[in-house]
Amino acid sequence: MITFSYCIDAAGNLIKLDLSVNADALIPHAVELVSTASELAQPFPWTKSVVDAVKEVLFVPHRLVVGTPAQHVHETRSLTHSAYVFVAPANDPASDEQVVELIDLYDEIPEDHASRGEIVQALSAAGIELIPLISVFNAALHVGDPTSSVVSYIKPGWISHRKVFRKAHVA
């Protein structure tokens, strides 16, 4: 049975899946950011492309991918797209209460204050990241007017490997 596959996250990044772990993650089985969207658009010689990822999965015999997420890759020769952005699993996650307190504190501090960076670092160490700016409205990550393109966030969103703590508010 195959133990790996790939997908594209909401930001356009190539993500590696380990089919033996993290089944309950927002992006099931996601373990590694392989190539960023910008690297896929303008690759370095060492960048793993979507084509490379598909070829790697196709190298495994079909009978070994049946019933796994890799079966989709075999049948369509394309990767699935996730509604969420990849966040690496945390080694030392914080409690939901602690995370909510830090997010609320982040909102109260002025934008140019140094403490905001310290809060972002503390949340990042606990496996919580700011939702990156994604120009297409995504109901899984955004709150606001779904008819217009997203150019900025009124209020940032926060996400972990397993949970959206707050959706980003768009204008």
Image (cartoon, rainbow, N blue to C red):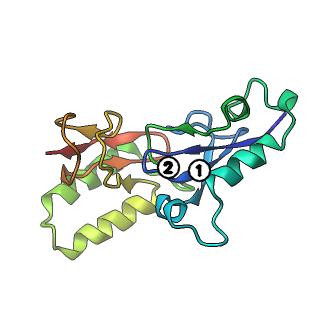
Whole-number angstrom distance, CA of label 1 to CA of label 2: 7 Å
Residue that mark 2 sits on: 86
Residue that mark 1 sits on: 15
Under circle 1, the secondary element is strand
**Neighbour tally class for label 1: few under 14, some 14-19, many 20 plus, Cα within 10 Å:** many
Residue 125: image location, x then y, percent? 46, 62
Tag 1: residue type? Ile
**In front: 147, or 20?**
147
Task: Tell me if residue 31 can be seen.
Answer: yes
Give left or right: position of 116 versus 15.
left
The residue under the point 49% across, 49% down is 86
Tag 2: residue type? Phe
Task: Tell me if residue 89 can be seen.
Answer: no
Quarter in which the C terminus is drawn:
top left
**Neighbour tally class for label 2: few under 14, some 14-19, many 20 plus, Cα within 10 Å:** many
Q: Tell me which label, 1 or 2, sits earlier in the chain.
A: 1
Residue 51: image location, x then y, percent? 66, 51
Q: Is residue 8 above or below residue 33?
A: above
The reply to whether dot 1 and dot 2 touch (C-beta < 8 Å) is yes
The residue under the point 47% across, 63% down is 38
Quarter in which the N terminus is drawn:
top right
Q: Which mark is residue 47?
A: none
**In front: 145, or 105?**
145
Select label 1 or label 2 by which is in front: 1
Q: Is residue 110 above or below residue 31?
A: below
Residue 40: image location, x then y, percent? 54, 60
The residue under the point 43% across, 50% down is 11
Q: Quadrant of residue 97?
A: top left
